[in-house]
Image (spheres, rainbow, N blue to C red):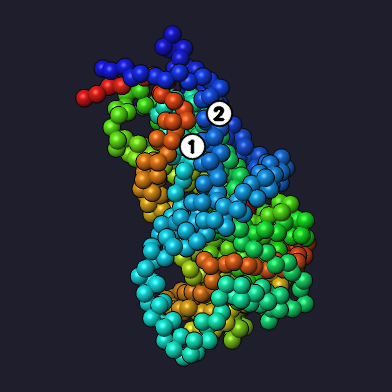
Amino acid sequence: MTRSAALPMTDVRRRVGVGTLMLFALLAQVSLLPHLRVLGVVADVMIVATVAVAVRRGPEYGGVFGFAAGLLVDLFLQVPVGLSALAYSIVGYAVGLAQSSLLRERWWLAPLLAGLGSLAAGLVFVLAGLILGQEYLLDLRSFLVLPARALYDAALALIVFPVTARLLGPAEETTTVRL
Amino acid sequence: MVVYRRSQRRSVLVLLVLTSITLVTLDLRGDGGGIVGSVRQAARDAFAPVQGAADAVFSPVGNFIDGIARSGTLKSENSALRRRLQEVEGDLARVRGLDRENRVLRDLLELDYAKEIDGVVGRVVGLAPGNFEWSITIDRGSEHGVKEEMPVVSGEGLVGRVVDVSQTRSKVLLLTDPRMSVGVRLAGSGETGVTRGLAGKDVLEVDLVDPDVPTEKNELVVTSGLQQSRYPPGLPVGTVASVSSRPGSLEKDLRVLPLADLERLEFVKILLWEPDRTEFDPVDAPIEGGTQ
C-alpha cells in the first residue's frame, strides 16, 4: 500500500477543471472528431472523459458528469434528448464504483477502461434506443461500429486521462494498491 | 455509515436514470419541439461560430486521414481518373480553388431541374458527431427562410431533407441515413418505389418495385412526387446500380447509387418548397421515431 502525495486542489479549481474538460470535449466531439473518422467511425471523447472523471472522482461524480456530457451530445444529434445521458451516466457510475479497487498506476488501465466504457455505453445506447422506438439502430453495422469505436476511444484515452488528471487533481481516495 | 453512503450513491444513479428517461419522454412527446427542442436549437446556434471556425481548420486534416484510410479505394479511383485525365488533355488542371467553388455555386444557382422552385445556397459546416447518424449541418437557418422538411439538393441531385432548424443552422438528414425514405420513380419504366438508406453504405435500397417491370442498370431514378409527397416531382436521386430478382419474391432487389457525392459535399441548395401537410404520401413519410 502506498499513499500518494496530493497537491492542494480547491473545490473551485476542481469545478473549473471539470467545466473546462466538458467544454473542450464537446468542442472536439462536435467540430474535430467528425473530420477524423477512421474507416467511417467517429471517436467518442465524451464517454472517454466520463470514464476518466469517474476513475478520479468516484461513482456520483462520474454519473453526474456522464449525465451532463450525454445531454450535451444529444443536443447535437438527431436522437431523443436524454438517450446518451442515460447511457453515459450509467457507465460513469459503474466505472466510479469499480475504481476504488483498481490499479490506477498501470498505464494500460486508461485505454482498457475507456474501451470497455465506450462499448458498454454504446450497447446501453442501442438497447435503450430500441426500447424507445429507434428501430434503425438494430442493424448489423451498429454491432460492428461499437467495437471499432471502443478501440478508437481506447487510443484517445492515452490523451484524455492525463489531461483529466491535470485538470481535476489527484483522485479523491488516494489509496492505490499495487500487486 | 457505509450503508448510508451506498444508499446515497444508489439514489444518485436512480435520480440520473429517471431524469434521463423523463427527458427522452418529453422530447419524444414534444416531437422535437417544446422546451427540449428550443434548448437544442439554442445550443446549436451558440456553438455555430466555434463549429464553423473549427470546421475550416480541421477539414483538411480530416481529408488527409480519410485519404490514408481509404487508400485501397483511392488506388482504383486514381487509375480511372488518370485515364480520364489523358482524355481531356489537362483541361481539369485549370480548375482549382475558387474556380471549383464558383462552379459548384453556379451549378446550384442554375439547376437543370426544379427551376421553378426558389432556393437558398448554404455551405456545409459540420458532419454528424455520432456513429448512428448520416447528416450534415449547413450555415443557413430560419432567418434565411429554411424550414423543417424542405428538400436539399446539390448540383447533381437530391441530397436529403432538413430535419432540424435553428436561427442560423440547419441539420440535413442524408439519403443514406436509415431513417430516410423517398418516394421515387424509375425514369425509364415509370415504375414507382421507395428508397431507404442502408447505414454506412453508399447505395440506397429501393423497395416496392414490381419484379416484372424491366429495369436496366444506370437507369435514372427521380422523386415521384406522388400524393402530396415530401419532395417535388422530378428531382434526380440516383442511377440504378444493381438489379436482381429472387424466385417467388414480390418485389425486385434494386440498389441505387445517389447522384450527389454525399461524402464530399461543400455547398448545397435548400429548396424553399413545402409539402402539403394536409395529406402525406405514406411512402416517404418519416419512419416512426425517426426524425424528431
Instruction: Name the outermost residue toward the top.
Output: B1
Q: Chain of mark 2?
A: A
Nearer-N-terminus badge (1/2): 2
- Amino acid type indicated by mark 1: Tyr
Residue A28 picture location, percent across and down: 52, 46
Residue B13 image point, x, y percent:
50, 26
In the image: residue B79, left or right of residue B274: left
Q: Chain of mark 1?
A: A
The residue to which callout 2 is attached is A16
Rendering coords of residue B209 (x, y %): 55, 76
Identify the image quadrant of residue B279. Answer: bottom right
The Cα–Cα distance between marks 1 and 2, rounded to whole angstroms, is 21 Å
Query: What secondary structure is found at the residue carrying circle 1?
Result: helix
Relative to residue B187, is residue B225 depicted above or below? above
Crowd around label 1: few <14 · some 14–19 · many ≥20 (10 Å): many
| Residue at x-position 46% and y-position 85% | B85
Determine if marks 1 and 2 fall on one subunit: yes
Say whether residue A170 is visible.
Answer: yes
- Tell me the quarter of the image containing the C terminus of chain A: top left
Which of the pair B273/B104 is nearer the observer?
Answer: B104
Left or right of A135 in this view: B172 = right
Residue on which disc 1 sits: A88
Q: Which mark is residue A32?
A: none
Q: Residue at x 35, y 18 (%)?
A: A5
